[in-house]
Image (spheres, rainbow, N blue to C red):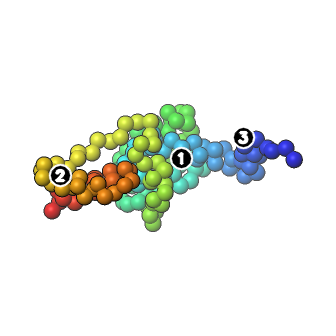
Amino acid sequence: MKPTPLGQALKRTLRAFKGRGKDIAKAARITSAWTRIVGEWMASQSRPVEVRGDRLKVGFSSPVWMTEAEYLSDQLIANLDEVLGKGAITHLSFCLLASIDPRWAQRIGPGRSDEPADPIPEPVLTDDQNRRLEQHLLNIPDPSLRDRMRRILKKALTRS
């Protein structure tokens, strides 16, 4: 049996959804460009939930992010126009989600966008605090984990 190319298999699968194939394809394009559409911070607190025709339903982790999206809805539709073409999505609706799956936030999180990361002011520590922090961090072999711990500990130290 000859293997079926992935593109053909996907087209066949989408056709099986009787009219929903275009919505599914549109949802996939939105999902892959989510960070570009809503920005890095909002992307980590939201996800596209459903596409039906020209309507997109977006789920949020909190009412604060949902309110922010309502305020920015015209800009979000303009960003969707850039990704999908003018008029592909003309209506947005919003809902609260019980939580955002951490794997979602990780997949679309910092460093996975075509736009620069939003600037976050780094907490300022004294030289002594920085030296002691770096000494403790030397015990963490993984560079990525060490960097994350540095940011968390700096934030905690500046709050106390």
Mark nearest the camera among 2 and 1 is 2
Can you give x and y, in whole percent of width and height, for residue 60 in the image? 43, 57
Q: Residue at x 42, y 42 (%)?
A: 111
Q: Earlier in the sequence, mark 2 or mark 3?
A: 3
Task: Say which amino acid is labelled 1.
Answer: Thr
Residue at mark 3: 7
Mark nearest the camera among 2 and 3 is 2
Q: CA distance from mark 2 to mark 3?
A: 54 Å
Q: CA distance from mark 3 to mark 1?
A: 18 Å
Mark nearest the camera among 3 and 1 is 3
Task: Say which amino acid is labelled 2.
Answer: Arg
Quick one: quadrant of the C terminus?
bottom left
* Depth check, front residue: 71 or 40: 40
Left or right: 78 in relation to 27:
left
The quadrant where residue 32 appears: top right
Element marked by disc 3: helix
Q: Is residue 112 visible?
A: yes
Can you give x and y, in whole percent of width and height, for residue 63 in the image? 36, 60
Residue 31's tag is 1
Q: Residues within 10 Å of mark 1 (few under 14, many from 20)?
A: some
Can you give x and y, in whole percent of width and height, for residue 40 in the image? 39, 45
Q: Is residue 53 visible?
A: no
* Depth check, front residue: 66 or 136: 136
The answer to whether the residues at label 2 and label 1 have Cβ atoms under 8 Å apart is: no
Residue at mark 2: 131
Q: Residues within 10 Å of mark 3 (few under 14, many from 20)?
A: few
Q: Residue at x 37, y 55 (%)?
A: 141
Left or right: 97 in relation to 54:
left
Element marked by disc 1: helix
Residue 81 drawn above or below residue 142 = above
Q: CA distance from mark 2 to mark 1?
A: 42 Å
* Depth check, front residue: 5 or 79: 5
